[in-house]
Image (tube, rainbow, N blue to C red):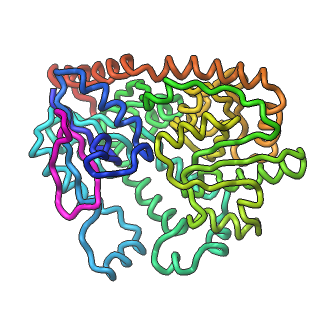
């Protein structure tokens, strides 16, 4: 079975490309590792990269990798105009994809995510195509200004960024264009893989005649081999992993830290991976609240690799997820796998992966008061920390079982191919 993946990240090709490992796409690499043991699968992995031409290589195994040019070559003025038009470069990207398909000749195509144009290949290529849902841009766009208003972004943002066509304001309008393309992907595609009630329900509306397969995601092995233990220290160390995006709830972290400090008398150390002091969202939030995050005990760690993330989580007391919208954030799943107590918003698909009151505490997104109260409640009860963490680990180990997920992925491939062989086609 020749299977071609289109992903946003290079998976195990990261070693060849000398990329800092463990920053993005770890679950894709974990799945690739599992499928290597199945001799019936010949795997190709294609991904966008900073290259001028498509590069084809192997990396010491049977997998073939295709690094695609990430964007159409343009002059400096053309790039500026493109950013102001909020281009998605759909046709350029699809052209690269077609070349790879012609070269690899897949029997089935597996697309990871709806954020790029890959899913639009459905219906124009001979091989059947299945989309593995990651998030949903259409819904994310509606939550873009949940924590920060458009006025906040314009007033406290960097005027230089605005002029150069970058930053949250321009990203929002490009997001809208990507969302429109995503809806077209849902209309074209016949097969989807997802894992939460949230993404299943969205698929039923955006692609009512498609086939939806439930399939959980793999986590990196290191998180199943280690177990979190309570530290019994005087003041809590909190951990969050977010991105430089307005809907990820970084402003909630600032508000919660302030409430715990002033109202609850708790001196917290809050470590936040994924953002730096120079990121646009950070600057906007600090200017709006007129405070440095470091003054609230918040340490911005930037990108961290797998080992630093693992050690950071094991050394913390509570994992806190403040996002306004998410599907099944791997950061939450990894904390659960370690057996950490989790406080998270009940956004998107999170209630599917965290059972409130049994495996963690869920609160309304954008509500710093209930989140601060949940952290205080959990910190004051070590028995509750251990119970929630233990239940979370049991659930995560079962949900992210490598053999079970690899088997499920292969079952989905076979089912799709059999439908095609039998001449079974769903109407578009």
Q: Quadrant of the N terminus?
A: top left
Query: On the rendered structure, is 407 left or right of 285?
Result: left
The boundaries of the magenta stretch are 44-64
Residue in front for this viewpoint, 267 or 279: 267
Q: Is 187 covered by the magenta stretch?
A: no
Residue 294: x and y in percent read 72, 60
Image quadrant occupied by the C terminus: top left
Kindly indicate the quadrant of the structure image that contains residue 49.
bottom left
**Residue at horizontal 17%, vertical 61%?**
53
Tell me what residue is drawn at x 59 percent, y 57 percent. Answer: 246
Classify residue 364 as left or right of residue 302.
right
In this rendering, is residue 223 above or below 387? Answer: below
| Residue drawn where x is 58% and y is 76% of the image | 158
| Residue 281 placement (x, y as % from top left) | 60, 63
- The residue lying at 64 percent from left, 51 percent from top is 249
Q: Is residue 326 visible?
A: yes
Residue 352 visible here: no
The image quarter containing residue 410 is top left
- Image vertical order of residue 329 relative to residue 88, above or below: above
Q: Position of residue 32 (x, y in %)?
A: 30, 32
Decide if residue 38 is on the left or right side of residue 79.
left
Left or right: 368 in relation to 300:
right
């Amino acid at each position: 079975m020749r299977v071609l993946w289109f992903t946003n990240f290079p998976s195990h090709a990261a070693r060849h490309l000398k990329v800092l490992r463990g920053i993005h796409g770890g679950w894709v690499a974990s799945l690739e590792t599992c499928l290597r043991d199945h001799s019936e699968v010949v795997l190709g992995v294609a991904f966008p990269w900073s290259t001028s031409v498509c590069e084809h290589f192997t990396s010491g195994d049977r997998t073939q990798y295709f690094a695609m040019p990430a964007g159409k070559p343009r002059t400096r003025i053309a790039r500026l105009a493109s950013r102001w038009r909020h281009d998605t470069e759909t046709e350029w990207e699809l052209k690269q994809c077609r070349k790879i398909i012609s070269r690899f000749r897949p029997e089935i195509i597996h697309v990871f995510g709806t954020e790029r144009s890959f899913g639009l290949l459905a219906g124009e290529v001979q091989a059947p195509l299945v989309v593995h849902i990651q998030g949903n841009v259409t819904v994310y766009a509606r939550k873009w200004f949940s924590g920060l208003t458009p006025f906040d972004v314009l007033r406290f943002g960097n005027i230089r960024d605005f002029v150069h066509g970058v930053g949250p304001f321009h990203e929002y309008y490009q997001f809208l264009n990507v969302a429109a393309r995503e809806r077209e992907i849902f209309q074209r595609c016949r097969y989807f893989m997802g894992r939460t009630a949230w993404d299943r329900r969205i698929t039923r509306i955006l692609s009512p005649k498609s086939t939806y397969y439930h399939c959980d995601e793999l986590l990196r092995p290191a998180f199943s081999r280690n177990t979190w233990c309570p530290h019994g220290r005087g003041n809590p160390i909190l951990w969050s992993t977010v991105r430089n995006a307005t809907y990820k709830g970084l402003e909630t972290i600032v508000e919660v830290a302030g409430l715990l400090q002033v109202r609850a008398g708790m001196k917290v150390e809050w470590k936040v991976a994924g953002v730096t002091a120079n990121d646009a969202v950070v600057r906007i939030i600090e200017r709006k609240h007129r405070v440095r995050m470091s003054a609230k005990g918040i340490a911005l760690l930037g990108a961290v690799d797998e080992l630093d993330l693992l050690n950071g989580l094991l050394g913390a007391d509570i994992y806190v997820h403040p996002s306004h919208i998410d599907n099944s954030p791997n950061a939450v799943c990894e904390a659960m796998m370690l057996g950490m107590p989790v406080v998270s918003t009940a956004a998107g698909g999170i209630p599917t992966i965290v059972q409130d009151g049994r495996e963690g505490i869920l609160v309304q997104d954008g509500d710093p008061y209930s989140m601060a109260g949940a952290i205080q409640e959990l910190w004051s009860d070590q028995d509750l920390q251990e119970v929630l963490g233990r239940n979370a680990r049991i659930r995560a180990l079962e949900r992210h079982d490598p053999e079970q997920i690899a088997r499920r992925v292969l079952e989905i491939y076979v089912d799709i191919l059999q439908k095609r062989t039998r001449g079974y086609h769903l109407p578009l």
